[in-house]
Image (spheres, grey):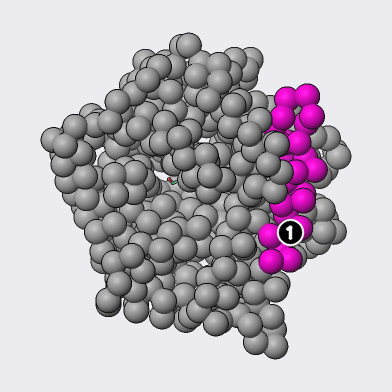
Amino acid sequence: MTVSQPSAVEIGLMSGRAGYVLRANDRGAFTVASPTLYPHMWSWDAGFVALGIATVSVPRALNELRSLLSGQWATGMIPHILFHEPSDYFPGPERWRTQVAAARPAGVLTSGICQPPIHVIALSRILHDARRRGGADQELAEEFVRETFDQWLAWHQYLATARDPYSYGLVEIHHGWESGMDDSPRWDSPYANVHPQPDMPPFVRADLAHVADPSQRPSDTEYARYLWLVEQKVRTRYDDTAYRATGDFVVGDVLVSALLAAASDLLADMGEELGVGGGTAGGVEQSRAIARRFRTGVLRSVDPQTGLARDLDLRTGQWLDVESAAGFAPLLCGGDEALTRRQRDLLLGPRWCGHSRLRWPVMPSVSPASPAFREQTYWRGPQWPVLNWLMAWALNRSGETEAANQLRLAGLSQLIDCDFAEYYQPVTGETLGSRDQSWTAAIALDFLA
Ligand code: 2M8
């Protein structure tokens, strides 16, 4: 399906409405992920949000990242949620009980797990744009990179050490929420070994009140497992080594690993350009080394038959063969040109964006040709605009500008109704989950810039 360029009127309407959504979700120093379903700051959402805001205001975008860094743990971990204000979101701070953790930050309540390291990718894009504009924006962005370089490096080092203690080159996650793709079929097999125990405190879900149909969200069985893993993290005091010894879910995540590799290279590039990270600690070199290790780990995970990267269940030693968007991790971190071309063709071909049943030819979270595909269930098949953005970004970065532009235009067509939904039914095009989702509005702004 060929998709045409949106008209000038459509562009004007969309950017106006996207800007309005981000402003409405702005709570001063941070942006809520969505107005009602997610009334806090989420880590990887904040990265996307920052790059969207930067198209309008570089200072406000940098503040978003500064605010996120205020929640950084002493280990270097950037937590997946910062709870700035009380709300009915569940699980809230009283369930996470991070006061048991020695490394938690002072003065801000957070969750105790993390999310994909998209932030430095966003920061480098913000810096690039700020430089193009020059003047005060450029000065501010460069100063921000100098100021925060060590914090980003500490974040990446945390993932590279505490989450890859045996140097496999794959970042270990301890909860499906850490992947950002909560109920993806990637995790079905490891979650089958997660067994909530009777002494888990009871809970009432709050999320279902915010969606039209519960089948758009994870099931109750899945939720009980999610909560049990939170409990296991609390009981091991958020100590990664202690959790690894006893926790039910320990998986090497290829997408997180690829983002870490890509982000580490970008951090090293920024460090070199601005003359930071070159001191005795050798921050630039450390970043390059992290990038190399995780790029190698991702490439090693590729199944030669399918051409897709695979997660590794570190409890059972099994590769997880699922046709999910994470299979395109090598496109994000690069390192093998032949594989990049193969993945580009696969991505645009009939098992993925070119599948005949898709309303819009944009990245689905699971291949519609896979038996695991579910049309309207969360990360089991629906299209998430941020995933499409990531693929377009990756294609651009590897010089595949035509393919990248195809995804960008199709992504914009999908968003033309200006609902900025959390995710989209891939066959009918219907909007699903939350509306006015910040990261969806943000990537629209970036696509339009
Ligand atoms: C979703 O995850 C949260 C838990 O972190 C939830 O379902 O309550 C995911 O889509 C995640 O990737 C995203 O960051 C978050 C906020 O948008 O919502």
Residue type highlighted by circle 1: Arg
Confirm whether the magenta stretch covers residue 293.
Answer: yes
- Residue at image position (71%, 63%) is 290
Q: Position of residue 217 (x, y in %)?
A: 47, 30
Q: Position of residue 372 (x, y in %)?
A: 62, 20
Examine the rendering and report whether any part of residue 88 can be seen. Answer: no
Q: Is residue 188 above or below residue 123?
A: above
User: x, y percentage for residue 410?
Assistant: 37, 29
Tell me, yes or no, whether the highlighted magenta stretch contains residue 405: no
Relative placement, left or right, of 1 versus 113 is left
Of residues 258 and 215, the one drawn nearer to the viewer in this rendering: 258
Give the magenta-colored segment's residue range: 288-311
Instruction: Examine the image and state in which quarter residue 421 appears.
Output: top left
Q: Which residue is mark 1?
A: 292
| Residue 207 vertical placement versus 1 (above, below) | below
* Quadrant in the rendering for residue 430: top left
- Estimate the x, y position of residue 129 in percent, counting from the top left: 35, 62
